[in-house]
Amino acid sequence: MAARDSIRAAKKLLRKAIKERVALLSDSHKEQESMQVAKKLLATPEYQNSKRVCVYLHMDDEVRTTTILKDIFSTKKLCYIPHYHGPIMDMVRLHSWEDYDNLPLTSWNIKQPADNEQRENAISNGGLDLIIVPGLGFTKEGHRLGRGKGYYDGYLEKYEQRLHKRPMTIALAFATQICDTIPTDDHDRKIDMIISANIDD
Protein backbone atom coordinates (compact mmCIF):
# COMPACT_ATOMS: atom_id res chain seq x y z
CA MET A 1 0.00 0.00 0.00
CA ALA A 2 2.85 2.39 0.87
CA ALA A 3 4.49 1.67 -2.49
CA ARG A 4 1.25 2.35 -4.36
CA ASP A 5 0.76 5.62 -2.44
CA SER A 6 4.31 6.61 -3.34
CA ILE A 7 3.71 5.90 -7.04
CA ARG A 8 0.43 7.84 -6.92
CA ALA A 9 2.19 10.84 -5.37
CA ALA A 10 5.00 10.69 -7.93
CA LYS A 11 2.48 10.59 -10.77
CA LYS A 12 0.66 13.61 -9.35
CA LEU A 13 3.88 15.63 -9.25
CA LEU A 14 4.82 14.59 -12.78
CA ARG A 15 1.35 15.49 -14.12
CA LYS A 16 1.72 18.97 -12.64
CA ALA A 17 5.19 19.43 -14.17
CA ILE A 18 4.09 18.27 -17.64
CA LYS A 19 0.96 20.43 -17.58
CA GLU A 20 3.16 23.43 -16.78
CA ARG A 21 5.50 22.59 -19.69
CA VAL A 22 2.65 22.17 -22.16
CA ALA A 23 1.04 25.42 -20.96
CA LEU A 24 4.15 27.28 -22.13
CA LEU A 25 3.59 26.17 -25.74
CA SER A 26 1.91 28.69 -28.01
CA ASP A 27 -1.13 27.67 -30.04
CA SER A 28 0.91 27.97 -33.25
CA HIS A 29 3.63 25.71 -31.81
CA LYS A 30 1.01 23.11 -30.81
CA GLU A 31 -0.47 23.26 -34.32
CA GLN A 32 2.97 22.88 -35.91
CA GLU A 33 3.91 19.87 -33.79
CA SER A 34 0.45 18.36 -34.26
CA MET A 35 0.84 18.52 -38.04
CA GLN A 36 4.24 16.79 -37.81
CA VAL A 37 2.82 14.07 -35.57
CA ALA A 38 -0.24 13.55 -37.79
CA LYS A 39 1.97 13.26 -40.89
CA LYS A 40 4.07 10.58 -39.18
CA LEU A 41 1.00 8.66 -38.02
CA LEU A 42 -0.68 8.70 -41.43
CA ALA A 43 2.50 7.28 -42.98
CA THR A 44 2.69 4.25 -40.68
CA PRO A 45 1.62 0.81 -41.96
CA GLU A 46 -0.18 0.33 -38.64
CA TYR A 47 -2.52 3.20 -39.45
CA GLN A 48 -2.76 2.59 -43.19
CA ASN A 49 -3.69 -1.08 -42.73
CA SER A 50 -6.31 -0.39 -40.05
CA LYS A 51 -9.95 -0.41 -41.11
CA ARG A 52 -11.53 0.33 -37.72
CA VAL A 53 -9.85 3.24 -35.95
CA CYS A 54 -10.64 4.97 -32.67
CA VAL A 55 -9.29 8.50 -32.28
CA TYR A 56 -9.59 10.83 -29.31
CA LEU A 57 -11.07 14.31 -29.81
CA HIS A 58 -8.35 16.58 -28.45
CA MET A 59 -8.35 18.99 -25.56
CA ASP A 60 -6.22 22.12 -25.63
CA ASP A 61 -3.20 20.44 -24.02
CA GLU A 62 -3.22 17.45 -26.37
CA VAL A 63 -1.91 16.83 -29.89
CA ARG A 64 -4.64 17.96 -32.28
CA THR A 65 -6.44 15.15 -34.09
CA THR A 66 -8.50 17.11 -36.64
CA THR A 67 -6.26 16.16 -39.58
CA ILE A 68 -6.36 12.50 -38.55
CA LEU A 69 -10.14 12.55 -38.22
CA LYS A 70 -10.51 14.00 -41.73
CA ASP A 71 -8.17 11.34 -43.12
CA ILE A 72 -10.15 8.53 -41.48
CA PHE A 73 -13.28 9.72 -43.27
CA SER A 74 -11.56 10.42 -46.61
CA THR A 75 -9.96 6.95 -46.67
CA LYS A 76 -13.28 5.28 -45.78
CA LYS A 77 -12.12 3.76 -42.53
CA LEU A 78 -14.69 3.19 -39.79
CA CYS A 79 -14.27 5.89 -37.13
CA TYR A 80 -14.86 5.50 -33.41
CA ILE A 81 -14.44 8.07 -30.64
CA PRO A 82 -14.42 7.92 -26.83
CA HIS A 83 -17.67 8.40 -24.96
CA TYR A 84 -17.26 9.07 -21.23
CA HIS A 85 -20.10 8.43 -18.80
CA GLY A 86 -19.19 8.49 -15.13
CA PRO A 87 -16.17 6.25 -14.52
CA ILE A 88 -16.76 4.32 -17.76
CA MET A 89 -15.42 4.96 -21.26
CA ASP A 90 -16.71 3.26 -24.40
CA MET A 91 -15.72 3.73 -28.03
CA VAL A 92 -18.69 4.63 -30.23
CA ARG A 93 -19.16 5.14 -33.96
CA LEU A 94 -18.75 8.54 -35.60
CA HIS A 95 -20.19 8.51 -39.10
CA SER A 96 -18.93 11.64 -40.86
CA TRP A 97 -17.37 15.07 -40.51
CA GLU A 98 -20.90 16.51 -40.33
CA ASP A 99 -21.65 14.08 -37.50
CA TYR A 100 -18.53 15.34 -35.68
CA ASP A 101 -19.47 18.96 -36.32
CA ASN A 102 -22.87 18.44 -34.71
CA LEU A 103 -21.61 16.82 -31.50
CA PRO A 104 -22.31 18.77 -28.29
CA LEU A 105 -19.49 20.03 -26.06
CA THR A 106 -18.88 18.48 -22.64
CA SER A 107 -17.79 20.29 -19.49
CA TRP A 108 -14.22 19.35 -20.50
CA ASN A 109 -14.76 21.41 -23.66
CA ILE A 110 -14.48 18.38 -25.92
CA LYS A 111 -17.12 17.01 -28.25
CA GLN A 112 -18.86 13.75 -27.52
CA PRO A 113 -22.29 12.24 -28.22
CA ALA A 114 -25.06 13.00 -25.75
CA ASP A 115 -25.50 10.38 -23.02
CA ASN A 116 -28.99 9.47 -24.23
CA GLU A 117 -27.90 8.98 -27.85
CA GLN A 118 -27.66 5.39 -29.07
CA ARG A 119 -24.52 4.67 -31.11
CA GLU A 120 -22.73 1.57 -32.31
CA ASN A 121 -20.29 0.31 -29.67
CA ALA A 122 -16.91 -0.93 -30.97
CA ILE A 123 -16.64 -3.93 -28.63
CA SER A 124 -20.12 -5.14 -29.58
CA ASN A 125 -19.61 -4.66 -33.32
CA GLY A 126 -16.35 -6.25 -34.38
CA GLY A 127 -13.74 -4.51 -32.25
CA LEU A 128 -11.00 -2.11 -33.30
CA ASP A 129 -7.77 -2.40 -35.28
CA LEU A 130 -6.20 0.73 -33.77
CA ILE A 131 -6.76 3.06 -30.84
CA ILE A 132 -5.07 6.47 -31.00
CA VAL A 133 -4.42 7.37 -27.38
CA PRO A 134 -3.97 10.73 -25.62
CA GLY A 135 -2.09 11.32 -22.40
CA LEU A 136 0.01 13.76 -20.40
CA GLY A 137 3.38 12.04 -20.50
CA PHE A 138 5.12 9.19 -22.31
CA THR A 139 8.45 7.40 -22.45
CA LYS A 140 10.02 6.17 -25.68
CA GLU A 141 9.54 2.63 -24.34
CA GLY A 142 5.75 3.00 -24.30
CA HIS A 143 4.95 3.92 -20.71
CA ARG A 144 2.08 6.40 -20.47
CA LEU A 145 0.94 8.86 -17.83
CA GLY A 146 -2.78 9.61 -18.14
CA ARG A 147 -4.93 12.04 -16.19
CA GLY A 148 -5.48 9.64 -13.31
CA LYS A 149 -8.99 8.44 -14.16
CA GLY A 150 -7.89 5.09 -15.60
CA TYR A 151 -10.18 5.35 -18.62
CA TYR A 152 -7.86 3.82 -21.22
CA ASP A 153 -6.34 1.15 -18.96
CA GLY A 154 -9.86 0.15 -17.94
CA TYR A 155 -11.09 0.09 -21.53
CA LEU A 156 -8.22 -2.10 -22.73
CA GLU A 157 -8.84 -4.54 -19.86
CA LYS A 158 -12.55 -4.71 -20.73
CA TYR A 159 -11.74 -5.11 -24.44
CA GLU A 160 -9.39 -8.03 -23.78
CA GLN A 161 -11.87 -9.74 -21.45
CA ARG A 162 -14.67 -9.49 -24.01
CA LEU A 163 -12.81 -10.10 -27.28
CA HIS A 164 -9.74 -12.05 -26.09
CA LYS A 165 -7.39 -9.87 -28.11
CA ARG A 166 -5.94 -6.38 -27.95
CA PRO A 167 -6.01 -3.61 -30.56
CA MET A 168 -2.87 -1.78 -31.65
CA THR A 169 -2.32 1.35 -29.54
CA ILE A 170 -0.50 4.47 -30.71
CA ALA A 171 -0.05 7.55 -28.53
CA LEU A 172 0.50 11.08 -29.86
CA ALA A 173 2.74 13.49 -27.96
CA PHE A 174 4.21 16.97 -28.05
CA ALA A 175 8.00 16.83 -27.70
CA THR A 176 7.80 18.30 -24.19
CA GLN A 177 5.57 15.41 -23.08
CA ILE A 178 8.33 12.85 -23.60
CA CYS A 179 9.86 11.76 -20.28
CA ASP A 180 12.91 9.68 -19.39
CA THR A 181 10.88 7.65 -16.91
CA ILE A 182 7.29 7.47 -15.66
CA PRO A 183 6.24 5.85 -12.37
CA THR A 184 4.01 2.85 -13.11
CA ASP A 185 2.16 0.09 -11.30
CA ASP A 186 0.61 -3.25 -12.32
CA HIS A 187 -2.54 -1.58 -13.69
CA ASP A 188 -0.70 0.64 -16.19
CA ARG A 189 -0.72 -0.62 -19.77
CA LYS A 190 2.17 0.04 -22.11
CA ILE A 191 1.42 1.67 -25.47
CA ASP A 192 2.63 -0.12 -28.61
CA MET A 193 3.97 3.01 -30.32
CA ILE A 194 4.62 6.63 -29.31
CA ILE A 195 4.67 9.27 -32.06
CA SER A 196 6.13 12.66 -31.25
CA ALA A 197 7.49 15.53 -33.27
CA ASN A 198 10.98 14.53 -32.16
CA ILE A 199 10.84 10.72 -32.28
CA ASP A 200 11.53 8.97 -35.58
CA ASP A 201 11.18 5.36 -34.50
Image: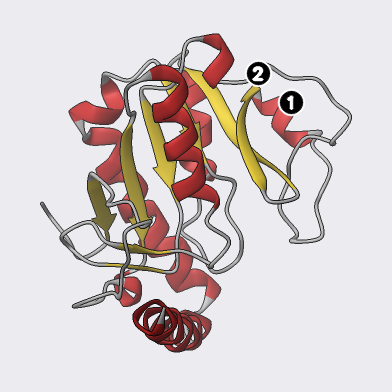
Q: Is residue 85 above or below residue 100?
A: below
In the rendered image, residue 56, in percent from the top left (x then y), is placed at 54, 44
Residue 145 found in image quarter: bottom left
**Figure quadrant of the N terminus:** bottom left
Can you tell which mark lies on residue 84? none
Element at badge 2?
loop
Question: Mark 1 near mark 2, Cβ–Cβ under 8 Å?
Answer: yes
* 152 sits to left or right of 194: right
What residue is rendered at 54% in x and 69% in y? Answer: 61
Q: Is residue 176 above or below residue 83?
A: below
Question: Mark 2: few, some, or many residues within 10 Å (few <14, many ≥20)?
Answer: some
Element at badge 1?
helix
Question: Mark 1: few, some, or many residues within 10 Å (few <14, many ≥20)?
Answer: few
The residue that mark 1 highlights is: 99
What residue is rendered at 55% in x and 20% in y? Answer: 122
- Front one among 108 and 35: 108
- Front one among 1 and 139: 1
Q: Is residue 29 above or below residue 190?
A: below
In the rendered image, residue 191, in percent from the top left (x then y), is placed at 28, 49
The residue that mark 2 highlights is: 95
Q: How many marks?
A: 2
- Front one among 43 and 80: 80
The amino acid type of the residue labelled 2 equals His
Question: Hey, which residue is sitting farthest right in the picture?
Answer: 116
In the rendered image, residue 67, in percent from the top left (x then y), is placed at 48, 41
The amino acid type of the residue labelled 1 equals Asp
